[in-house]
Image: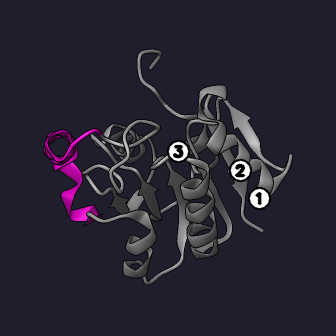
Amino acid sequence: MADRDVRPFIHFLKGKKELVGVEVGAESGNNAKIMFEELDIHHMYLIDVYDTYFGMNGHGVLDSKKTGNACYNGAVNNLRNYMDKITWIIDYSEYAIEKIKEKVDFVYIDGNHRYEYVKKDIELYYPIVKIGGVFGGHDFKAEESGVIQAVTERFGNNIYQKNWDWWVIVK
């Protein structure tokens, strides 16, 4: 397992049954595939715009619609064995939230890494996680200061953090 990027976030979900989760920023589906392989996932909402983010590039944003199409096709291929457990929401995360009509066990944020977008994702998605669920994300690192700023503003030092993952247990 040393060659797999099993993110520390998921260890707080192991052993729980029939999980329902959300990943914001599904990209090529690599992280979602690992979650399906490592966890008892009943259903997952995968959210990605698969395009540039309001004309931006970098910091978690794809450079073109062509790259987005390649990522989406790769994700579909990567996750082909789990398609019956996936709801794809191809939209900006701020609009995608409207399509999730249930409480979930976890949310993993790995979309646009700019401060204002991470802050908005936290505001929008935190309330849909069940008490005792896990809310977190990726890219808590110096090169992504927007992630660090938004996360620490909202949660202070009350986060778990390992490698580039960050998470909290919802209370």
| Mark count | 3
Magenta stretch, overall SS: helix
Q: Amino acid under label 1?
A: Arg
For marks 3 and 2, give the one nearer the viewer. 3
Q: Which residue is mark 1?
A: 154
User: Is residue 76 shown in magenta?
Assistant: yes
Marks 3 and 2, how far apart at CA = 11 Å
Q: Which residue is mark 2?
A: 151
Of residue 84 and residue 145, the one placed in the foreground of this image is: 145
Q: Which residue is mark 3?
A: 113
Q: Percent from the top left, x then y, of residue 10?
A: 56, 44
Describe the element under mark 3 as helix, strand or loop. loop
Q: What label does residue 99 carry, if any?
A: none
Does the rendering let one see residue 127?
yes
Q: Quadrant of residue 28?
A: top left
Marks 1 and 3, how far apart at CA = 15 Å
Compared across the picture, whether 147 is left or right of 77 comes to right
